[in-house]
Image (cartoon, helix red, strand yellow):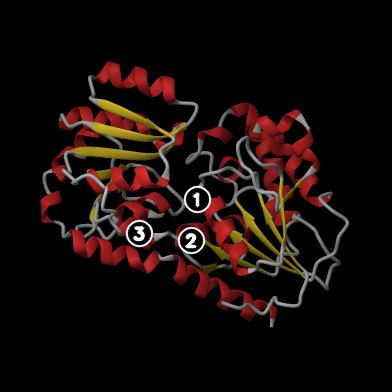
Amino acid sequence: MTTPLAGRSVALVHEWFGDTGGSEQVFRRIAELVPHAQRFVLWSDPGVTDPGLRESWLARTPLRRSKSLALPLMPLVWRTLSREHFDVVLSSSHAFAHTVRLGAPGRTRHLSYVHSPARYVWSPDYDGRGSGRLLALPRRALQAVDVRLSRHVASYAANSREVRDRIRRFWHRDAVVIHPPVDVDYFATAQPDDPVAQRDYLLGVGRWIPYKNFDLIISIAAAARMPVVIAGSGPQEANLRRHADRVGAEVTFEVRPDRARLRQLYRGARALLFPVHEDFGIIPVEAQACGTPVLGLRRGGLLETVVDGETGHLVDSTRADDYVPLLRRLDQLDAAGIQAHAKSFAAAEFAAKLADWIEAECR
């Protein structure tokens, strides 16, 4: 697929670059669409090897190991990233990447794909990393900086209606909604060596951090007296293991499963548990591509990715006992219908809509 950016100098900008996150998947897809672009990030996490990524000066400091400590410096870093000028800047932003300056006012066209306005700055009720009385004043200061330094952005795209509404509320700007790409074909295709799916356990997938509510997932499994697999990694691992012992849950921890193993886990699960207020949520779509229903919180991105009563069940509660009755209704859901729904989030759909947006803004 071609874009109107051929023949123009283009910079692609992302926050810190990890190996498995949903925002990184989006950035890779954007880079595929604009292969000649220069790619900038604050830093790459350990283990990430991509010689095409150009890191900021922050990568040469100890702050690369602490996102929270680096946060107040990020707007400054983006403003001192490079003296190069580009015709078009396309940022992939979930903190301050949309404030970057890589061109001359009036000459450089800046488009920004937004995963969310920084949750720990704007939405500490969703993400506790920005909560607390001591952080109230710096949070308000960062909000003012975020708005002031992003006025040069010509157009925004949001990864969901949820994020579009936040952009309107916090930045007083409009945005087109372009759902992020999901590798639906990969997860929908069983391999000959995949084990027979027994659908005899519950599943939780993602980063093991507090707002992802893996402790609640474990409590739901304990209340339902069903085994649960917790797949991913993160700083909460020890706490989650202690919680599993405390509530008497039968938990298997799968640390950093590769994609092939993750597909097997999706295909063998009775349901994906996702009681999270997420911006969009790629994981629930991957599960549905495997024909696996989602049981989650009636908030945020799940309102766009799960058809309540058809591809899963949504709950207005974070009490474990409120999820248990719905587990008994999963047999009423059709796996083929669940998979068909997931196809609307395929990578080809994302690429086509992203190209249309770029063309409309850069013609």
- Give how far across and how far down residue 344 sits, in percent: 36, 68
Alpha carbons under labels 1 and 2: distance apart: 8 Å
The quarter of the picture where residue 311 lies is: bottom left
- The residue under label 1 is 22
Three-letter code, disc 2: Pro
- The residue under label 3 is 305
- Give how far across and how far down residue 27 sits, in percent: 59, 57
Residues 201 and 175: in front is 201
Kindly give the residue lying farthest to the right in the view shown.
83
Alpha carbons under labels 3 and 2: distance apart: 11 Å
* Dot 1 crowding, Cα within 10 Å, few <14, some 14–19, many 20+: some
Three-letter code, disc 3: Thr
* Contact (Cβ within 8 Å) of mark 3 with mark 2: no
Q: Is 304 displayed left or right of 139 in the figure?
A: left
* Contact (Cβ within 8 Å) of mark 1 with mark 2: yes
Label 2 sits on a secondary structure element that is: loop
- The residue under label 2 is 180
Q: Earlier in the sequence, mark 3 or mark 1?
A: 1
Q: Residue at the location (60% across, 46% down)?
A: 118
Residues 60 and 224: in front is 60
Q: Is 111 displayed left or right of 323 in the figure?
A: right
Residues 69 and 197: in front is 197
- Give how far across and how far down residue 232 sits, in percent: 42, 36
Q: Residue at the location (26% across, 34% down)?
A: 319
Identify whether 10 is placed above or below 73. below
Three-letter code, disc 1: Gly
Q: Is residue 152 visible?
A: yes
Q: Is 77 displayed left or right of 295 in the figure?
A: right
Q: Which label lies toward us, 3 or 2? A: 2
Q: Earlier in the sequence, mark 3 or mark 2?
A: 2
Identify whether 18 is placed above or below 280. above
